[in-house]
Image: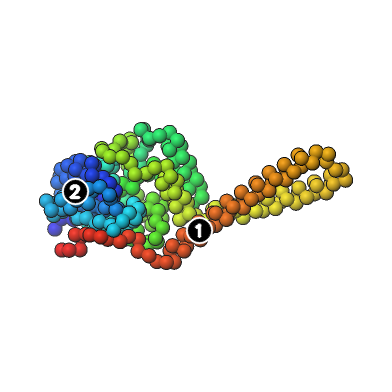
């Protein structure tokens, strides 16, 4: 019996890209000497994405789908797709064809012939991406790799092919606040990286704006490092030392009274504002960690399903 290849495809308002993706991917899958299943996960789309996916399923019994009751985010969609995948090999890819489906052939070779547990992809360029976004992305990878014990490759995509043991390891991590790039690295397993040039979307527009990317970066840092909390401790020690030095200086000059009282008041106000902003920043960082803990303690489901055909067989 042939091995089964499962492909997980998260979707959010992708009615333009879906037909193009399906038309481009199916011929490639048919050249592979394996059974396959396409698992589309609709993350609360407000356009015709769910209807298009269900139409695929009516015409092709290799198409499976999970439709969320609302938008839970791409991380939840990835988890849902992986949990429904039944294949010996499982791939994750986007529907916009920025993840070239023809690379699946080389990925399978990396696992079946070369003995890797995972074959992942990374972009070597960010051509077509806004420069400010590229700059922040590069800084994010530098920061998170310096602060965490897991290595997250610069330019890494979610697009990858994994063996069943690796997928099971990922699914065993059931935290509500998920950062898949970090989880992929945390579970270990032998990984081969394939590099390729950045590819523009086949249709539609990206769902990642600058705000969402910033929140995603914060999620990654908070999920895999306590470095910000240790930084607060260091900052507190540094400010305490400066405070002692300032007290000594004031003690020395206390014999003379400044004639420019207005300047003294301005300096005092500026110092108070600075210390207050530092205090609020520190409280904010600690609050983020506490909020993440609170959401984990509530133990709510990662996603909720409105409709699916995966378990109907």
The image shows residue 233 at horizontal and vertical percentages of 62, 55
Pick whichever, 287 or 4, lies toward us. 287
Q: Residue furthest left?
A: 59
Secondary structure beneath label 2: helix
Query: Horizontal placement of 254 versus 164: left or right?
Result: right
Query: What residue is at 33 percent from the left and 48 percent from the top?
Result: 158
Pick whichever, 115 or 125, lies toward us. 125
Pick whichever, 201 or 190, lies toward us. 201
Residue designated by label 1: 289
The answer to whether any part of residue 51 appears in the image is yes
Query: What residue is at 52 percent from the left and 56 percent from the top?
Result: 226
Query: What residue is at 28 percent from the left and 46 percent from the top?
Result: 13
* Residues at marks 1 and 2, CA–CA distance in whole angstroms: 40 Å
Query: What residue is at 31 percent from the left and 51 percent from the top?
Result: 118
The image shows residue 218 at horizontal and vertical percentages of 47, 50
The image shows residue 174 at horizontal and vertical percentages of 37, 62
Pointer 1 or 2: first along the chain: 2
Residue designated by label 2: 52
């Amino acid at each position: 019996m042939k091995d089964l290849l499962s492909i997980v495809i998260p979707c959010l308002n992708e009615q333009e890209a879906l037909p193009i993706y399906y038309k481009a991917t199916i011929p490639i899958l048919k050249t592979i000497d394996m059974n396959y299943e396409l698992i589309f996960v609709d993350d609360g789309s407000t356009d015709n994405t769910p209807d298009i996916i269900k139409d695929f399923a009516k015409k092709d019994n290799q198409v499976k789908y999970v439709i969320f009751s609302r938008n839970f985010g791409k991380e939840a969609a990835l988890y849902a797709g992986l949990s429904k995948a039944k294949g010996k090999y499982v791939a994750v890819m986007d529907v916009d064809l920025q993840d070239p489906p023809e690379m699946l052939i080389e990925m399978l070779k990396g696992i079946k012939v070369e003995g890797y547990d995972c074959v992942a992809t990374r972009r070597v360029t960010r051509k077509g991406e806004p420069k400010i976004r590229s700059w922040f992305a590069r800084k994010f990878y530098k920061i998170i790799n310096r602060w965490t014990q897991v290595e997250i490759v610069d330019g890494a995509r979610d697009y990858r092919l994994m063996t069943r043991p690796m997928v099971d390891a990922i699914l065993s991590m059931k935290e509500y606040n998920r950062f898949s790039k970090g989880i992929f690295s945390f579970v270990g397993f032998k990984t081969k990286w394939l590099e390729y040039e950045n590819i523009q979307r086949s249709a539609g527009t990206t769902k990642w704006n600058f705000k969402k990317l910033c929140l995603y970066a914060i999620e990654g840092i908070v999920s895999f490092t306590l470095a910000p909390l240790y930084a607060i401790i260091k900052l507190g020690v540094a400010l305490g030392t400066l405070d002692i030095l300032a007290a000594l200086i004031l003690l020395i000059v206390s014999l003379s009274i400044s004639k420019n009282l207005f300047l003294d008041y301005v300096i005092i106000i500026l110092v108070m504002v600075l210390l207050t902003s530092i205090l609020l920043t520190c409280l904010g960082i600690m609050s983020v960690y506490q909020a993440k803990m609170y959401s984990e303690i509530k133990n709510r489901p990662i996603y909720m399903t409105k409709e699916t055909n995966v378990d109907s067989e």
